[in-house]
Image (cartoon, rainbow, N blue to C red):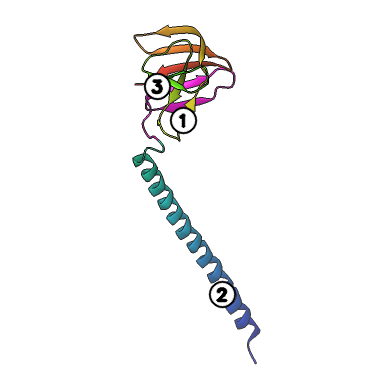
Amino acid sequence: MFNTNTQSYNVFNRMLAIRIMGRLFNRKIMKQEENAADTILEIAVEQGVIENEFNWKLVRERDGLTNQSKDIMWIEWNEDGTLKEKHDTFAIGRSLLMSPFNQFFTWQTTPITKIIAATADVFYLKFETKNSIYTLINTK
């Protein structure tokens, strides 16, 4: 036969050991996931999919939605909605495009319909589009 106290002790120790091993395993997996996430982020930055440097901040007035990007560009459209021309400066009828400038761009506004306020010394622009009112600030 067997000693009841010894058996329950061994079962308890086995259960405790399994529990501890599970926690250690989970920690190891979590650490590996953190390392993998860091690696994925580094690759995404290197390939221009995401950015880690921000020079521009755009805030939508109605809900405070904020987008940041390294660069911006202004886009002019043809009547049929196709790209007409890219610009470095804003103007009525141009849309703001926030970098990166690929299929992963951060944000694009509809064309500007009204310029509410603008300053040149510290770049600040408040403008209205068909859909929203935005404030654009150069953070550098």
67 left or right, relative to 121: right
Residue projecting furthest to the front = 80
Q: Residue at point 48% right, 16% down?
A: 135
* Circle 2: element type: helix
User: Marks 3 and 1, how far apart in space?
Assistant: 12 Å
User: Label 1 belongs to which residue?
Assistant: 106
Q: What residue lies at 48% left-to-right and 8% top-to-bottom?
A: 115
Given the image, on which type of amino acid does mark 3 rest?
Met
The residue depicted at 36 percent of the width and 12 percent of the height is 122
Q: CA distance from mark 3 to mark 2?
A: 63 Å
Q: Nearer the viewer, mark 1 or mark 2?
A: 1
* Vertical placement of residue 103 versus 118, above or below: below
Q: Magenta segment range?
A: 51-73
Residue 123 position in % (x across, y down): 38, 13
Q: Secondary structure at mark 1?
A: loop
Q: Nearer the viewer, residue 100 or 85?
A: 85
| Residue that label 3 marks | 73
List the single residue furthest toward the bottom: 1
- Whether residue 57 is in magenta: the answer is yes
Vertical relation: 13 (above or below) 94: below
Q: Residue at x 63, y 87 (%)?
A: 3
Between the residue at mark 1 and the residue at mark 2, the CA separation in whole angstroms equals: 52 Å
52 within the magenta span: yes
